[in-house]
Image: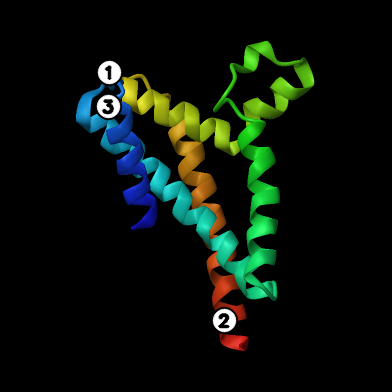
Amino acid sequence: MRYLLAGIVIIVLGVILGYSPGAGVGGAVAALGLVVVFAFGLSWVFTTLGLLLRSPNAVMNTGFMSIFPLTFLSNVFVEPDTLPAGLEAFVDVNPISILVTASRGLMEGNADPSDIAIVLGVAAVLTAVFAPLTTRLYRKR
């Protein structure tokens, strides 16, 4: 619910500031759904970290240190074509970049189905690996 609410706030704020999704409400809902599915998969990683690490601060710092580079080494803030070749190559395969590209495409009505499939695949793999691990760690407590 937290990811859904945060996504709705961001989309509403964007519309208030003048953004108009080319694919309309349906595209915005589809993009939000994709982001929520990806966030659900990623949340299992952080749940596992929460069970492995001893303090909330350690979980927060570890999570920040892993998400921070992935977010800033993505196409969220800068066009990959403007980056040095090595950095551009990393940005092009970064799951966050693929999520952003797919979400933008869904909102504009020109999403690449392969990007959507990659995002859903990454979310499924994260869930398949970390959900059972989280469950096992939780039962040991």
The answer to whether 36 appears left or right of 81 in the picture is: left
Tell me the SS state at disc 3.
Answer: helix
Determine the image quadrant of residue 84.
Answer: top right
Q: What is the three-letter code of the residue carrying label 3? A: Val
At label 1, counting other C-alpha atoms closer than 10 Å, the crowd grade (few under 14, some 14-19, many 20 or more) is some
Q: Is residue 23 at least partly visible in the picture?
A: yes
Determine the image quadrant of residue 70.
Answer: top right
Query: Label 3 vs label 1: CA separation?
Result: 12 Å
Q: Is residue 59 above or below residue 29?
A: below
* Residue of label 3: 15
* Residue of label 1: 22
Q: Is residue 48 above or below residue 121?
A: below
The answer to whether 71 appears left or right of 21 in the picture is: right
Tell me the SS state at disc 2.
Answer: helix
- Residue at 36 percent across and 43 percent down: it is 7
Q: Is residue 7 above or below residue 84?
A: below
If you read the primary sequence from the N terminus, does the residue marked by circle 3 or circle 1 appear first? 3
Query: Label 3 vs label 2: CA separation?
Result: 41 Å
* Residue of label 2: 138
The answer to whether 110 appears left or right of 82 in the picture is: left
Q: What is the three-letter code of the residue carrying label 2? A: Tyr
At label 2, counting other C-alpha atoms closer than 10 Å, the crowd grade (few under 14, some 14-19, many 20 or more) is some
If you read the primary sequence from the N terminus, does the residue marked by circle 2 or circle 1 appear first? 1
Query: Label 2 vs label 1: CA separation?
Result: 44 Å
